[in-house]
Amino acid sequence: MKQAIITLLALLSLLSLASIAAAGDSIALGVRYGGEIHSDTQITKNSEFYEAFGDLYLNRLISIGATLAYSAADHKALGDFRREDSYPVTALFKVHVPLPIPSIQPYAGLGQALIFHEKHSTTGSPVAFVGANISPLPTPLFLNIEYRHQFNGGDLDFIAGGVGVKF
């Protein structure tokens, strides 16, 4: 019981520190393109992943976001391949890591995807991800790279890169 109270107090302390961190930017919007990098035996490497993303920065350390994507992959069924299109909508919670190098802003987080399939019923999947926003110039534009692991649907791994703008 004592350990639980100490843990709870530590979490509350961290949250209070994070809540007073000033937000440098309030909104980021962008697009990404990528594909699967690991997959189960039923999915080939011939995949495409297009995604629009948006983040609302609650402060410098925490943001919430959403993505809307189009994903297409060739699935192997009875020795034949068929194309499957899906439209994932994902809600995300991100923790940003402040680095002494301001042009690189790594993050990690968790989310929940609702995946609308063209040929069968809608499914859901928890996701975990890591990524980074890279701003080599002092402009609101940034490059983005993200690795995402989808736990349901064959344990899919995606990597994508793109561009965004902060304002």
Image (tube, rainbow, N blue to C red):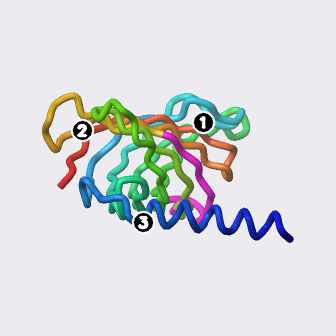
Which residue position is annotated with label 2? 142
- Element at badge 3? helix
Position of residue 135 measured from the top left corner of the image (x, y, whole percent):
24, 34
Upstream in the sequence, badge 2 or badge 1?
1
Disc 2: CA contacts within 10 A as few (<14), some (14-19) or many (>=20): many
Q: Looking at numbered disc 1 in the image, what kind of residue is underneath it?
A: Phe
Residue at label 3? 19
Residue tagged 1: 81
Amino acid at dot 3: Ser
On screen, residue 86 above or below 148: below
Quadrant of the rendering where the C terminus is positioned: bottom left
**Residue pictured at 46% horizontal, 47% vertical:** 71
Asked if residue 72 is positioned above or below residue 126 in the image, the reply reads above
Residue 15 % position (x, y): 52, 64
- Quadrant where the N terminus sits is bottom right
Residue 144 lies in what quarter of the image? top left
Among numbered discs 3 and 1, the one appearing first in the sequence: 3
Q: Which mark is residue 108?
A: none
Asked whether, in this view, residue 42 is left or right of residue 130, the answer is: right
Residue for point 29% across, 35% down: 102
Magenta-drawn segment:
116-130
Q: Is residue 124 magenta?
A: yes
Local crowd size for mark 1, using a 10 Å CA cut-off: few (<14), some (14–19), many (≥20): some
Q: Position of residue 158 (x, y in %)?
A: 52, 38
Work out how far the residue at label 3 is from the one at label 2, CA to CA, in angstroms.
Answer: 25 Å
Which label sits in the foreground, 3 or 2?
A: 3
Q: CA distance from mark 2 to mark 1?
A: 37 Å
Q: Secondary structure at mark 2?
A: strand
